Amino acid sequence: MEIFHLERMAIYLYLWGMKTTLDLPDEMLHQAKIIAAQRKTTLKELVIQGLLHVTQTVPDQAGQKRREAMQRLIAGLQAQNTEAMVPLTRGEAHDR
């Protein structure tokens, strides 16, 4: 009989979810409440939508964007002048 009770409780938790407390910065919470009101939805639904967006994003897409950004950065950092450097004489250094 107790096993039946535990199974029923597990099903209840699965169906209804668990309550969670989030500690958000005041300004972020304020902005989120405004956005929820503008969209005529609840703060809970807004958080769920955000979490779905994050959890359903294919990790490879984010990784691909990072790789592309890194390639652009490396290309931008590469020197255009590939001639060997020649030490300046003291006079040439002072003339510059």
Image (tube, helix red, strand yellow):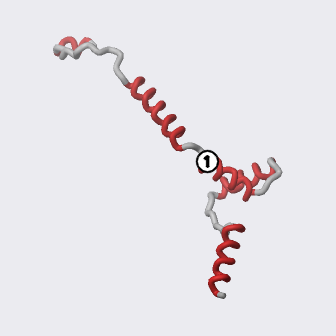
Reading the image, the residue beneath label 1 is: 56
Q: Identify the residue shown where x is 52% and y is 44%.
A: 59
**Relative to residue 59, is residue 76 depicted above or below?**
above
**Relative to residue 17, is residue 1 depicted above or below?**
below
Q: Identify the residue shown where x is 80% and y is 48%.
A: 39
Front residue (pair 59, 41): 59
Residue 12, image quadrant: bottom right
**Relative to residue 84, is residue 34 depicted above or below?**
below
Instruction: Please provide percent x and percent y for residue 88.
Output: 19, 15
Front residue (pair 84, 86): 84
Residue 82, image quadrant: top left
Instruction: Please provide percent x and percent y for residue 81.
Output: 32, 14
Left or right, 41 with reference to 7: right
Q: Identify the residue shown where x is 73% and y is 59%.
A: 44
**Which part of the image, by quadrant, shows the C terminus?**
top left
**Which part of the image, by quadrant, shows the N terminus?**
bottom right
Amino acid type, callout 1: Gln
Task: Determine the residue located farthest toward the left in the rendered image.
Answer: 89
Left or right, 79 with reference to 19: left
Q: Identify the residue shown where x is 49% and y is 39%.
A: 63
